[in-house]
Image (cartoon, coloured by chain):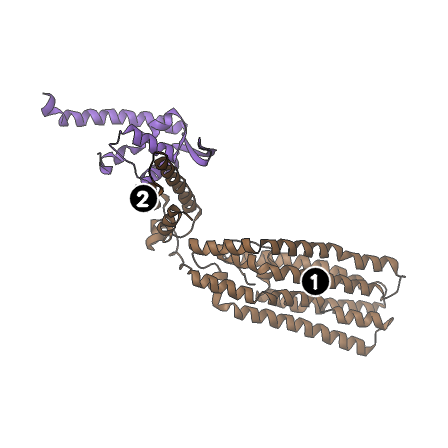
Amino acid sequence: MIGADAIRGHIDLILLSILEDRPSYAYELSKTITDGSRGEYLIKQTTLYTAVKRLQSQGLLDSYEDVSTSGKPRTYYKLTAAGLKQLDVKRAEWRSTRALVDRFADGKDTS
Amino acid sequence: MTVIDSYLDTLFAPYPDSPRLREARAELRALMEDQQQALMDAGRTESQAVGAVIAEFGSLDEVAAELGITAELDGTAVGTGPTAPAMLSTERAEEYVEAVRRGRWIPAVAIPLFVLSALPLLLLIAVGGEEPSGWALGAGLTALLVLVAVGVVLLVLQGSRMEEFEDIDKARFSPTPAVREIARDLRREHRRERTLATGAAIMLWILAAVPVILMGVLTDAGSLAPLYGVCATLAMVALGLWILLRSAWSDTAAAALLQEEDEDDLSATSTSPAIRVVAAVYWPVAAAIYLAWSFLGGEWGISWVVWPIAGVLYAGLWSASAALGSAADDTRSRTRRA
């Protein structure tokens, strides 16, 4: 199980990546994250909502009202142009972060 | 009310009510419902599903911080203005509704009294024919002043009755979800009554023009008979006001509890001191103008038009004063009393 602290800085990247494929609403986002983590991580509802609102206030997401597949009215979120650009930046940043952390963490195992 | 609703109510209770928070509550509720449904579809019982959803909720502080409302919660007020006003308890909200309900007849009687105040004078003049006698004038004017005085006393009485609820009338409180529920129930419960009353009042006001017009057209020039038409018109306007104001209390109380602004609420402005002065002075002045024109100009046959004009101006005045009344206060408070 991955702790909330370990993943905190990366929620934005995860959300932006999911929304790159298609617009989505809160529950679908949470389900996608839970399913994608294969049970390793369970996102709290408030953590998800806070992250979405933060991205929205930064202009990276847009929201609109629509009806979900279950027929209920839901607030959908989609990437803005700025959000798409930010996703590229975050991806690049994540790659170099991962590479850096790997260089230290993997050292003893792989040498 | 589902378990999730009560859970969210409890969590949101310490926070002041705001559109952003309401939106957050609605969206979190939808998220929780979807999760509960998914768990139940996967074979969990309802209580298991609800339990799991609540366990995964997290902390509302996190959301509040993102929405910029932590300051309001702990009262330290960083850049969000003064400390949030006190919460309104359910008991006090119910007391308030009860007080408004018990006093509902006061504006409903007082305001029509102003409109009716000139009636005895006009009837006495009309019955007397040509030049009214000193006796008729004296009795009519006395009746006018007495009726106005009774109306003003009633409004002052209402003002002091509602004084202990000034914080509610001036919107200096934070409504809890329970209080909002009371207000919405009150409105729902009395909706039919209000709709019927509004319809009846509007019909009366439209038809109120008929007596004046008919009497004006049908009677000979120079006759005093149009005054009967004026009397019937004033009586219909007053009756309409009575019907409307008698049923307005539930909406007035609900609007105060929900902190809504609505500017053309007659009963809400009826107790502001400025309105009392205007109401007290208006019809006596109209009577003075009417008598001066009639006596000095000797135009008894035409001077009655003062009354229909005064009636229309009176209606305009109410709307204007209602607008002024709410503009004079700051945005969150109102001169609301019923």
Residue lying at 66% horizontally and 63% vertically, measured from the top left? B242
Which residue matches tag 1? B239
Residue type indicated by callout 2: Gly
Identify the secondary structure beneath mark 1: helix
Task: Residue B266 in the image: state x and y as whole percent.
Answer: 61, 59
Residue type indicated by callout 1: Leu
Colour given to chain A in the rendered image? purple
| Both marks 1 and 2 on one chain | yes
Task: Residue B61 in the image: state x and y as whole percent.
Answer: 31, 47
**Residue closer to the observer: B53 or B261:** B53
Quarter residue B150 falls in: bottom right
Position of B182 with respect to B191 (left or right) is: left
Q: CA distance from mark 1 to mark 2?
A: 58 Å
Quarter residue B49 falls in: top left
Residue lying at 28% horizontally and 35% vertically, measured from the top left? A42
Position of A22 with respect to B58 (left or right) is: right
Residue pushed farthest bottom?
B135
Q: Is residue A53 above or below residue B322?
A: above
Q: Is residue B68 visible?
A: yes
Residue B51 is labelled as 2
Q: Is residue B329 visible?
A: no
Residue lying at 35% horizontally and 50% vertically, measured from the top left? B11
Position of B134 with respect to B268 (left or right) is: right
Q: Nearer the viewer, mark 1 or mark 2?
A: 2
Task: Read off the chain for label 2.
Answer: B
Task: Read off the chain for label 1.
Answer: B
Total tally of numbered discs in the picture: 2
Colour given to chain B in the rendered image? brown
**The C terminus of chain B lies in quadrant:** bottom right
Disc with the residue nearer the chain's start (1 vs 2): 2
| Crowding at mark 1 (Cα within 10 Å: few <14, some 14-19, many 20+) | many
